[in-house]
Image (tube, helix red, strand yellow):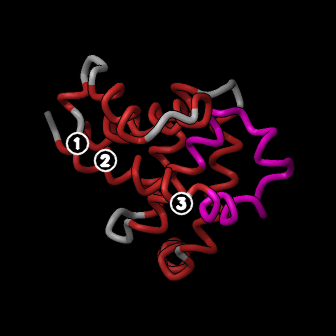
Amino acid sequence: MSGKAARRRAREFALQGIYQWLLSGNSVPVIEEHVAQVTGFDKADRELFISLLRGTLANVASLQEEFVPFIHRSVEELSPVERAILLLATHELKIAPDTPYRVIINEAIELAKSYGGTEGHRFVNGVLDKLAAKLRAVEVNAAKDAKS
């Protein structure tokens, strides 16, 4: 299996773990053990999964502080799927400068299309575009300059 597919699966499983945490409040070890039992987990990038899940859940409050200025409702009003995707993508934008911001946003949009509501992917895209401009200003501006 290609590295890209393994990384996408890792993000999917991390999303499932974050979603589970939001709904159940289970501990990270319990969530990791549960997710590892899911069919197809063996094809995921396990290292990326663990990094994304643990890093996101260890920093929920600070990650939410990053994206709250770009949502027009309270965090509690977000669907658990949208909230989990925003937490995951915000974490990755902050800790993975080697992954282009567009890749992170595109992956988040794909997750929203697969798991979220009808217009959820547009909401996620809008929030993350604004957030990337803040967190990755140099990279975003360079991409804009390259277009013009």
Taken as a whole, is the magenta stretch helix, strand or loop? helix
**Real-space Cα separation, disc 3 to disc 2, in angstroms:** 14 Å
Q: Which residue is mark 3?
A: 59
Total marks placed: 3
Residue sitting at x 55%, y 26%:
115
Amino acid on which the number 3 mark rests in the picture: Asn
**Could you say which quadrant of the image residue 122 lies in?**
top right
Residue sitting at x 25%, y 37%:
5
Amino acid on which the number 1 mark rests in the picture: Arg
The stretch in magenta equals 61-86
Amino acid on which the number 2 mark rests in the picture: Ile
Assess disc 3: are there few (<14), some (14-19) or many (≥20) residues with their C-alpha within 10 Å of its C-alpha: few
Q: Secondary structure at mark 3?
A: loop
Q: Which residue is mark 2?
A: 50
Q: Which residue is mark 1?
A: 46
Query: In the drawing, does residue 53 fall left or right of residue 147?
Result: left
Residue sitting at x 16%, y 39%:
2
Query: Depth-wise, is mark 3 or mark 1 nearer the camera?
Result: 3
Q: Provide residue 33's location: percent of width, then percent of height.
A: 31, 30
Q: Are marks 1 and 2 in contact (CB under 8 Å)?
A: yes
Assess disc 2: are there few (<14), some (14-19) or many (≥20) residues with their C-alpha within 10 Å of its C-alpha: some
Magenta-colored stretch includes residue 55:
no
**Real-space Cα separation, disc 3 to disc 1, in angstroms:** 20 Å
Q: Provide residue 144's location: percent of width, then percent of height.
A: 55, 74
Relative to 71, say whether 2 is above or below.
above
Q: Which mark is residue 145?
A: none
In terms of sequence position, does the residue under pointer 3 or pointer 2 come before the other? 2
Q: Secondary structure at mark 2?
A: helix
**Real-space Cα separation, disc 1 to disc 2, in angstroms:** 6 Å
